[in-house]
Image: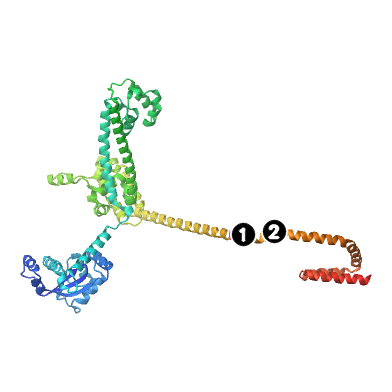
């Protein structure tokens, strides 16, 4: 049976025909020795076909597919084009040797081409990789090195690419730093207590909190200076006025020795350092809470920020935690006890890091193991949702927490819990409703923004129109005084002509009284139908009237 070798290089796909190699009767060591020399190896292995990648992006896509065990369309067409064709109903008289067994299984399933991956094929492909630049004449060793370097950088860059807001490495570092800070603050606060107790030993019994003790040591300094006027200041620190009075009374009758100002200064500086560390620890805890809500909201809402962060840090990453089965997650952190139990054939541990959860503490002693197993199951579900879901929501974590609460009630009171299917359906419905509400809110905000823009544009247009009318108004205001002067001149003329007009008006009234009512109706209808006449027509009528009046006279 003929053997073909599929080699995936940084520059393209290559297919080699191993015609002078007989797998039967040859050991792997003999093949390994024959691979080193090119002259000997080139007689057994010949280049059958080579298909270069079209671009660096294409090379990266092909490399990603091969690393995931997927056969691409380019690889399929390359194999079908260059391998011998097999008649229908007959088996192939050749096989293809591949490096990755997943790729071989996918090729054989999709195309029916027989593939193999064993030590013999691996050694032959190692020889192909060693002498690949000699098989292709136009390919220089420097070109191959550049292609390998570029593809390696782009492949690593693509693997490292992630969402900046979902970096679980920050959570791992934060929880480690939080644990070390807790240890350091405890040891430093104990040192402050021992140091200041030489001067004021009664303060240790009155104040138990380390942070408050460090603040008091910084404020009090010399106990002999304490008086009743300092009670409000001490009450602000302790939060209790009775304690402040007790501190003042204890300072008056203290058995401690006096310290020099230099010693008190050093105690004060060290107390300030402890206070700064405590404040930084609070800020770090707030940072951890926000990061956990961004990275693993469901796991956080189910089991809490600290326990969830410890699980992620112990597993190495959120993806590693999501890959762990529930049985592994249950005893995560109790590896020593597990292997000790396996070695001594004793009882295996029931819980690891999840023991710090409040659910385990609330369960009864006989139900702690059952509760730990159930909680590990829900934590595994929550971590997988957080790792592989695109929507950053804590709906599933809240529903899983409700399930754990129901399981606790079931163990204590016997109340039957809901089915997992019903709870998950309710969680999906809540999530879809939340997403739809967010979309509707966005649409409303968009429409309101559009309306605001339209109103602004209308207001601007109205402002422009007002600006356009301003010069016309100014011109009208300028023209008004001229018209007033003309009116005054006309009034003077009318005063001179008034006696003549009075006589004309009397005659007109006499004639109008004699005219019949029909003419008045006709004149009214004509005045309604006819449009208003111009000033020139009015002057002509006056002239005609004056002529008729002269004739009558």
Q: In this view of the protein, can residue 418 be seen by the observer?
A: no
The crowd level at tag 1 (other Cα within 10 Å; few <14, some 14-19, many 20+) is few
Expressed as whole percent of the image width and height from the top left, the position of residue 136 reads: 17, 73
Q: Position of residue 145 (x, y in %)?
A: 19, 66
Q: Which quadrant would residue 225 be assigned to in this image? A: top left
Which of 273/187 is in front? 273
Residue extending farthest right? 553
Query: What is the x, y in percent for residue 221?
Result: 32, 27
Q: Residue furthest bottom?
A: 87
Q: Is residue 266 left or right of residue 105?
A: right
- Magenta region, mostly helix, strand or loop? helix
> Is 503 included in the stretch rendered in magenta?
no
The magenta segment: 463-468
Q: Is residue 160 visible?
A: yes
> How is the model colour-coded?
rainbow
Cα–Cα span, label 1 and label 2 = 16 Å
Of marks 1 and 2, which one's residue comes earlier in the chain? 1
Label 2: which residue? 477
Nearest the viewer among 136 and 215 is 136
Say how many tags the image has: 2
Residue 433 in which image quadrant: bottom left
Viewer-side residue, 174 vs 144:
144
* SS type, badge 2: helix
The residue where tag 1 is placed is 466
Foreground tag (1 vs 2): 2
- Residue 113 as seen in the image, left or right of residue 163: left
Residue drawn at the location 6% of the way across and 65% of the way down: 29
């Amino acid at each position: 049976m003929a053997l073909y070798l599929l080699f995936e290089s940084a520059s393209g796909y290559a297919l080699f025909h191993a015609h002078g190699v007989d797998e039967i009767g040859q050991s792997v060591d003999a093949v390994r020795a024959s691979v080193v020399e090119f002259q000997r190896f080139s007689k057994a292995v010949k280049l059958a076909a080579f298909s270069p990648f079209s671009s660096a992006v294409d090379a990266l896509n092909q490399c990603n597919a091969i690393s995931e065990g997927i056969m691409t369309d380019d690889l399929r067409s390359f194999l079908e084009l260059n391998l011998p064709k097999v008649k229908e109903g007959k088996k192939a008289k050749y096989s293809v040797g591949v490096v990755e067994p997943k790729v071989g299984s996918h090729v054989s399933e999709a195309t029916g081409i027989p593939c193999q991956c064993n030590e013999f094929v691996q050694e032959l492909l190692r020889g192909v990789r060693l002498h690949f630049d000699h098989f292709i004449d136009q390919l220089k060793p420097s070109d191959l090195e550049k292609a390998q370097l570029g593809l390696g950088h782009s492949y690593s860059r693509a693997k490292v690419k992630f969402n900046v807001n979902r970096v679980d490495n920050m959570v791992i570092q934060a929880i480690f730093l939080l644990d070390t800070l807790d240890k350091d603050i405890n040891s430093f606060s104990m040192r402050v207590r021992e140091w200041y107790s030489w001067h004021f030993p009664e303060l240790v019994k009155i104040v138990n909190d380390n942070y408050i003790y460090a603040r008091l040591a910084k404020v009090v300094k010399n106990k002999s200076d304490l008086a009743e006027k300092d009670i409000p200041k001490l009450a602000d620190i302790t939060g209790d006025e009775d304690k402040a009075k007790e501190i003042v009374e204890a300072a008056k009758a203290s058995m401690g020795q006096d310290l020099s100002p230099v010693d008190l200064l050093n105690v004060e500086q060290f107390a300030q350092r402890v206070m700064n560390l405590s404040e930084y620890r609070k800020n770090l805890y707030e940072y951890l809470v926000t990061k956990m809500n961004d990275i693993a909201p469901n796991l956080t809402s189910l089991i809490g920020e600290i326990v969830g962060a410890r699980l992620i840090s112990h597993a190495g990453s959120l993806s590693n935690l999501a890959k762990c089965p529930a049985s592994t997650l249950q005893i995560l952190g109790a590896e020593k006890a597990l292997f000790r139990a396996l070695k001594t054939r004793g009882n295996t541990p029931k819980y690891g890091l999840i023991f710090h959860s409040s659910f385990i503490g609330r369960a009864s002693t006989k139900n702690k193991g059952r509760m730990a197993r159930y909680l590990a199951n829900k934590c595994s579900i929550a971590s997988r949702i957080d790792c592989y879901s695109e929507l950053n929501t804590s709906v599933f974590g809240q529903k899983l927490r409700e399930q754990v609460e129901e399981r606790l009630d079931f163990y204590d009171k016997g109340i039957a819990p809901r089915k997992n299917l019903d709870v998950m359906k309710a969680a999906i419905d809540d999530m879809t409703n939340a997403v739809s509400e967010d979309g509707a809110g966005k649409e409303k905000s968009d429409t309101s923004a559009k309306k605001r823009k339209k109103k602004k544009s209308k207001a601007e247009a109205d402002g422009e129109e007002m600006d356009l009318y301003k010069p016309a108004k100014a011109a009208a205001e300028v023209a008004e005084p001229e018209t007033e002067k003309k009116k005054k001149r006309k009034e003077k003329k009318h005063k001179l002509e008034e006696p003549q007009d009075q006589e004309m008006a009397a005659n007109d009234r006499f004639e109008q009284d004699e005219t019949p009512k029909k003419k008045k109706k006709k004149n009214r209808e004509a005045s309604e139908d006819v449009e208003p006449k111009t000033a020139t027509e009015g002057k002509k009528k006056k002239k005609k009237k004056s002529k008729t009046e002269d004739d009558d006279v």
